[in-house]
Amino acid sequence: MEQNLQGGGKNPLKKLGNKWSTFMEDTRTRWHGFLRLSPREKGKRALGWLGDNALYLLILVFVLGVFFYNSSFLSFGSIVNILMQSASRLLMALGVAGIIVLTGTDLSAGRCLGLCACICASLLQANGVANKMFSRLTFSPALILLALLVSLLVGGAVGACNGFMVSRFKLHPFIVTLGTQLILYGAVMWYVSLGQNNSAPIAGLAPAYTRLVTGGFRILGVQIPNYLWIVLGVTVLMWVVWNKTVLGKNMFAVGTNPEAAAVCGVNVSRTIVTVFFLAGLLYGASAFVECARVASNSTATGVNYELDAIAACVIGGVSFMGGIGKISGVVLGVFLLQLVNAGLVFLNFEPAVMTVVKGAIILIACAIDMRKYIAKR
Amino acid sequence: MEYLLEMRGIEKSFPGVKALKGVDLRLRPGTVHALMGENGAGKSTLMKCLFGIYQKDRGQIFVGGKEVHFAGPRDALEGGVAMVHQELNQATKRTVMDNIWLGRYPKRGGFVDEAKMRRDTLVLFREVGITLDPDAVIGTLSVADRQMVEIARAISYRASILVLDEPTSSLTEPEVEHLFRILDSLKKKGCGIIYISHKMAEILAISDDVTVMRDGAFISCDRAEDLTAGEIIHRMVGRELVDLYPEMEGEVGEELLRVSHLSARHARVKDVSFSLHRGEILGFAGLVGAGRTEVLETLFGLRAREEGHLYLDGKELTVRTPRDAIRGGIALLTEERRANGIFGGLSIVENACICSYPRYRGALGLLSGAKMTRDTARLAKELQVKTPSLSTPIRLLSGGNQQKVILGRWMLTSPEVLLLDEPTRGVDVGAKYEIYRLIGELKKQGKGVVVVSSELPELMGICDRIIVMSGGRISGEVSGKESTQEEIMTLAAKFA
Ligand SMILES: Nc1ncnc2c1ncn2[C@@H]1O[C@H](COP(=O)(O)OP(=O)(O)OP(=O)(O)O)[C@@H](O)[C@H]1O
Ligand SMILES: [Mg+2]
């Protein structure tokens, strides 16, 4: 224990080196320990290891299977494509993950994104588009910033309202967001009927905006869009929030034992509202990206996204029991879900079959992964 | 001679620790067998292996001469083993009788027969002599009452082997005596009872055999009459322990905290007034239900206050929430560790530092993990917390070690007033001494400490003054050193 606690001075590089050598040392002793076991014990351990990593092994098998069926699945372009799809879904998942850590869930995330995306789109239509929603609004680059701010503001407000209802009236987030989800749907329907739009999809976005979000440089003929950098930055920021701030620590405490948290002087209500608010901001940011990606935004934008986000969190080990989860897990979960999604497309399943298979995969993945968290006896 | 239960060479490992290294236990019929050892010695683990909660890695278990392999608690119950767990494991939102018959509801025509359940509960309660409403929601009862319900439930299985893992940790004298009468009658019926407790007086009073464990290893098994308390402690800790209570230094100074006419809204706390001085250790004695815990919780802002004022250093302090209290320099160690003390899945570091995060904020408001780990490591050493590492989830620690970590949590906030509700609950003798020493340290620094405890000798050993409560009111006050148990018990029964 002692050496573990020392760390290794101020030099971060040295610290990393120390950590690495302890890790290697540890691995070596464990391996030697393993070799010394009886064959039966060896088998038991190996099975245990397989069980613990079954989810990843299974996905590996699936990926290889798809690859043999259609080798272009693992081409550079396809992989980048899956990565980019994951990136676009990651922001929402990061928001939902915090709420799941609080033993909650958010059913309103997709609709919230839809509303924000429609607002963004309405503000960013190019000049001279037929049936431009707000015909007197002339596009200028400053509007891009405005749209982002409005999107964040609306998302944040929705999140804060959810959080307020949860903390003030002690309602379960499932109930609260079930309600807000409907309210938001109504709001989108009303919003797209404004101006000249007549409830049509809002299209004809200004190229300056779409280029800013989805444009980027090319590697080996594959486009790396700019939003990747936004997503990366926000992910790092969220990692810091979760691991290095009082808010993050309090979030885990409240998720584990709210009563004990109150005894410890944690402002439980404020923690809940802040986590929901942060989630809302992330939906807003996500909407700003999605709006440009979708290009034609309507009341259908974002529908059911929250289900994918929740599934990704659970696959990534964010537990519904509360108080358990890692940012790296969320990232992995989102990626794995997209990988499976893309794999199913490559396998050329009919949409009906595909949906069933996807549902089954989520169930199996979670059941397998849960094994890790059930106490070993 | 036929043993009721025989455990031979039991071994059990968890990731990072070998909790049991070949432990033997032999239980004779019609006896109480005390299982002794320090916190983390492996007592609960051994019992969980017996009860099928854990699967032993190696070893054999014989019940009534036949080898058994219990796959889970259900098997064990059917095999004639019942257990009262160290931590209350109840469905807090359900009623008393729901909890008692959970898993074996009486049925009639496919439906649960509530009337029979109620009847049986009352019969059972009469037999063990408790007076509780079978329809009360269990979460609304006091911890002591809940513990009595657990004991009644275990007895209701009519098992021949009864395991009691620290059943008396929140009971006071009368309930303990009552429990002992129940155990005596079970003994007469030929049952065997395994009894785990850190209260030495109880062990000497009730046990016939004593098995001692240390660090997961079997140390000895003897007849109780051949042992003294000193000898048992010696075997438990592996060294001589001279005093049970340290010498308390420091003078009682000026008034630090004054409480005037405190009443709680939803609990029976009526018109409680007292004052606490700097460098003073003030004890609260009383029977179960006297309202001692409620007084502390009301002071701390966990319970709604009907009326009353709080003065800290002569200035009024308004406390509506625990946050107000903490900001004012008050800390509360709660009675129910599992419900509102620990964060089970979080690491020891996080559990220890949760109340003092602002202190660990560095540049940009980010928390310094290294600093937190350093302070926690110091605490763990001071309090002798036994753990594989500081990043271990606290849930995996033994009960006593969890208690030490949350006591340490409040030490880190350096409070002026420390309210301790059963601070040594489930803590072994050696560590108890350590905790008393820490309390003494606070006294020397001129802090004020309030200790609520069900163990009178403990209060008399460390307190300067003892306030006795009865029926939600203060019924008297005695000096810590010069009072007698009889004097305190008389006061405690005054309004009961
Ligand atoms: N599920 C678990 N996973 C990992 N370690 C465990 C687990 N359960 C117990 N341990 C470890 O096993 C050891 C023995 O714990 P146990 O609870 O049996 O102690 P105990 O003698 O009952 O102590 P106490 O008097 O404090 O209750 C401890 O070091 C504890 O940390
Ligand atoms: Mg124990």
Image: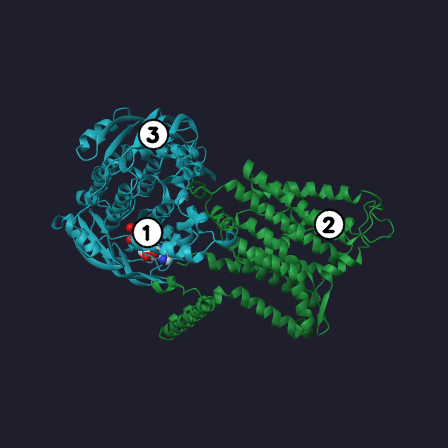
Front-most of A30 and B404? B404
Q: Within 10 angstroms of label 1, few (less than 14), some, or many (20 or more) residues?
A: many
* Ligand number 1: quarter of image: bottom left
- Labels 1 and 3 in the same subunit: yes
Task: State yes or no: discs 1 and 3 in contact (Cβ < 8 Å).
Answer: no
What type is the residue that disc 3 sits on?
Arg
User: Measured from the top left, where is residue B483 in percent x and y?
Assistant: 18, 32
Left or right for B244, reference B133: left
Chain A's colour?
Answer: green
Left or right for A12, reference A129: left
Residue identifier under label 3: B258
Residue identifier under label 1: B401
Residue identifier under label 2: A147
Which residue does the image show at 56% across and 51% down from the upper left? A98
User: Which mark's residue is nearer the viewer, 1 or 3?
Assistant: 3
Please state the chain letter of the residue tagged with numbered disc 3 in the rendered image: B
Disc 1: residue Cβ within 8 A of ligand 1's nearest atom: yes
Q: Secondary structure at mark 3?
A: strand
User: Which mark's residue is nearer the viewer, 1 or 2?
Assistant: 2
- Chain letter, colour cyan in render: B
